[in-house]
Image: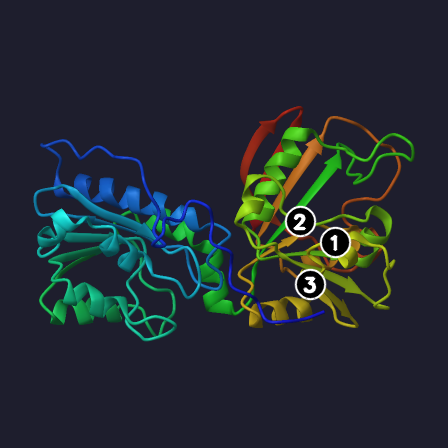
Amino acid sequence: MLGNVPSLKSPPCFTPTPYLKFAPVPTPAPDSTMQETDEHWMQLALESAAQGIGRTSPNPMVGAVLVGADGRLLGRGAHLQAGGPHAEIAALAGVSPADQRSVAGSTLFVTLEPCCTHGRTPPCTDAIIAARIGRVVYAMHDPNPAHAGRAEEILKKAGLSVTTATCGDKARTLLKPWTHFITTGRPYIIAKAGMSVDGRIARRAGEGQWLTSDQSRHDAMQLRVGADAILVGAETIRQDDPALTVRGPASAWKEQPWRVILTRSGSLPEDSQILTDAHKERTILWPGKNLRQVVAELGKMGVVNLLLEGGGQIFAQAFADDLVNEFHVYIAPMICGTGKLMVDTAAFAGAGTAPLWWKETKMIGTDVKLVYERA
């Protein structure tokens, strides 16, 4: 089935007003330079923004911190749900009654250029000016060319001081998937696979279901938490009958990702988990379309983060068409000697080599995790 992307559930860390509670934080040392002080508060804003992982699509994750002229933290907030309060508004709402007078002349640190147009919510630039904030520091410009730099012009025209690019690299890393979505209209795609040392994605019959360790599967679950949709091929459903759900603590607040199935025939076993469980309304069967076409359609639905979980033909199409932005592979310490390869060689034939850039290597349990980016 195919439907509109629903709004996300409110996570349990919400207070009666939809703003996060944060632990107390130290203030910068008295002899800190302005740059050091700015970076200190922006780091807190980035930590706030990260609370939005898996919650905000198709909006960006944004965090904001409001600091008084005397250097005290007045308010802190994050954008946690499309259509909900933006981070700047959350930070202003977090100011206690006793500190309201300190907002005038304060400094607002925000991880992304404040919005200056009316969407689901009014422009944040209007609220900033109305609150008589004296200075705004933001980490990166809006990647949308139609908006980039406009907030700076509006705020400066209203008499505010504006500083940009503080911790810009960190902000761009956090918002890399959203920036890709805004500039291309397509989801940011992570391909995830577990395999043996010899590249097999399944063990011999009768040897057990899992290749990788419990720790690796827990780590991979975090990729699902950040995903708006999970895509697999129909053969994966027929062979493994996966649930493709978010499990663990995040399931209490995380809207289950769309489960997208590519199928030539549109026919799947009627008792498949994805067709019968409590989240069956989150399943989309897409017959008769190739991967590139489906990726484009998911972009139109507002899917920012797409997780590919196989099988071999899906991976072959994704790498052959240069659709993968990141590749996370968990390598188990075993040789299977037989079974399906991670990339279906027949489906990949003639595509040419797909180069990747190494990003990270780490041990997880008994497995090795490798992370690559598209070259």
Pointer 1 with pointer 3, Cβ within 8 A: no
**In the image as oriented, which residue stretches furthest toward the top?**
366
Q: Is residue 164 visible?
A: no
Residue highlighted by disc 3:
281
Please name which of the two marks, 2 or 3, marks the residue nearer to the observer: 3
Nearest the eye: 56 or 140: 56
Q: Amino acid at mark 3?
A: Glu
**Above or below for 269 versus 39:** below
First in sequence, mark 1 or 2: give its number. Answer: 2
- Is 26 displayed left or right of 359 in the figure? left
Q: Amino acid at mark 1?
A: Asp
Q: Quadrant of residue 137?
A: bottom left
Residues packed near mark 2 inside 10 Å, few (<14), some (14 to 19) or many (20 plus): some
Secondary structure type for disc 3: helix
Residue 97 at x, y percent in the picture: 16, 50
Residue highlighted by disc 1:
277
Please name which of the two marks, 1 or 2, marks the residue nearer to the observer: 1
- Is 267 displayed left or right of 285 in the figure? right
- Per the rendering, the mark at residue 245 is 2
